[in-house]
Amino acid sequence: MQKKKVNSINSKILQSVKKIHFIGIGGVGMSGIAEYLVKNGYEVSGSDSAPGEITNRLSSFGVRIFEGHNASNVNKNIDLVVYSAAIKADNPELAKTLELGIHNVKRAKMLGEIVNNDFLIAVSGTHGKTSTTAMVAKVLIDCGLDPTVFVGGAIDFLEDGNSRIGKGKYSVVEADEYDRSFLTLKPDIVIITNVDLDHTDIYKDLGDLKNAFKEFLKGGKENCRIIGFGDDRNVADLLNSVNNICSFTYGFGKQNKYVIEESYLKDSKIRYEMNGEYIDLSVPGKHNVLNSAASFIAGSLLELDPGMIKLSLKSFFGVKRRLELKYENDIRVYDDYAHHPTEIEYSLFAVKEISKSRVITVFQPHTYTRTRDFFGGFAKALKDNDITILLDLYPAREKAIEGVSTELIYDKMKSVGLDNVYYEKSFDNAIKKLGEIVKKDDTIIFQGAGDVTNLCSDFVNKLKNTEN
């Protein structure tokens, strides 16, 4: 554990605060802040409806974890309550908080309180935020800037955590657009990886989402600089709409300030050229070329040594559940967080570049609204798999919507003549089906933002047991 810096955070909210309770502490965004605060000497507790690996990690640092949301988890000795965007107004702990008059804030506001007084690099975008945030963080750490970090995934160089206490003046954070959370941040540098319609439970259409991004960009500090993926039409539109802010575009198109000229793959590793610099990567995929390009530019704007930046990027090996290789022998198995059609396409493209034979994807749709609004996009993104196994959708924070299920994707894929798709409604049946169809040299991707990761672990364990 890092050395505690008791109550040293420059925040009005945290003045005179000792005990903090988190409602929904098991979420990746919430857990990072909770870990950061307990390491800073605060007494932290939290509740979650489904404790697991994340809450077990927090327990090891001294966080008291409650299973389930109950009013009894909150008492008058608590000084501050932090709750996630997924927590509804009728949550019993939130209701008890209000009844007792305990000061309460959303996770996004708490994050802003911690990082806004630093030199803040905020990584935004519909896809690629977590990997890009991790890359930028690694560059700053390796170059000796000792940043504070908040990222939406488990990182090996953060000891499998998703936050870091830094002693330097820099903070690197993943800026989440869900529930307009990123509007609490006041960055010095913004990265925009891309902008696609998502979170249709929050945004009514693409224009509404783009307006939120525009507000986010305008909320930066004086002399804020933007690094944007210029090949993305929506990003280009945003940059044109805030033309009084200094921006640096990157991409494959010649119109960009930073142009990726060429890239090639060798032994599952990538080398590409950008503005005369040759950059090597140990992670596959065009999307990682773009993520690393943005990270290189961020380091350049901080006037870091280009050679050190490149060494740092070369030794980046990814984020847990971001196309994470979990098993390799006669077959390869990946665990992948992708849950939007664009993300699925990126992952499939990357895997097909390095696969020896067939690619089999086991896909779990995430949320009713996303399935309702993008089932056609999912069907299109999955069609290039050699075999697709669909699972029941994972509802996450949402209640059921009549007529919305995995069958929408299944029926769409079957309607265009795809015979290589199966719909297995239980994990046991999915593993049985894999046992029937998997051959030597196949690549299997377990994909989705829900508990499909548990199915991946079960399958890998079965493979390992077979070896023995």
Image (spheres, rainbow, N blue to C red):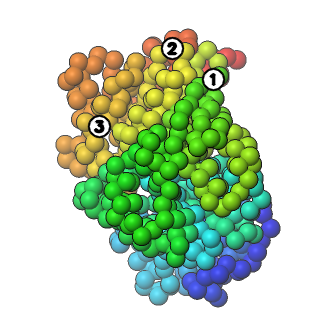
Q: Quadrant of residue 326?
A: top right
Distance from Cα at disc 3 to Cα at disc 2: 25 Å
- Quarter occupied by the C terminus: top right
Total residue callouts: 3
Say which amino acid is labelled 1.
Answer: Lys
Q: Which residue is mark 2?
A: 357
Q: Nearer the viewer, mark 1 or mark 2?
A: 1
Q: Secondary structure at mark 1?
A: strand
Say which amino acid is labelled 3.
Answer: Gly
Query: Which one is nearer the viewer's eye here, 366 or 424?
Result: 366
In the picture as drawn, the residue positioned furthest to the right comes out as: 3
Q: Is residue 63 visible?
A: no
Q: Check the image and report above or below for 467 versus 231.
A: above
Which residue is at 62% across, 70% downward? 119
Q: Which residue is mark 3?
A: 377
Circle 3/circle 2 CB separation < 8 Å: no
Q: Which residue is mark 1?
A: 266
Distance from Cα at disc 1 to Cα at disc 2: 17 Å
Tell whether 219 sits left or right of 120.
left
Q: Secondary structure at mark 2?
A: loop
Q: Earlier in the sequence, mark 3 or mark 1?
A: 1
Q: Earlier in the sequence, mark 3 or mark 2?
A: 2
Say which amino acid is labelled 2.
Answer: Ser
- Quarter occupied by the N terminus: bottom right
Distance from Cα at disc 3 to Cα at disc 1: 31 Å
Q: Nearer the viewer, mark 3 or mark 1?
A: 1
Which residue is at 32% across, 60% downward? 210
Q: Secondary structure at mark 3?
A: helix
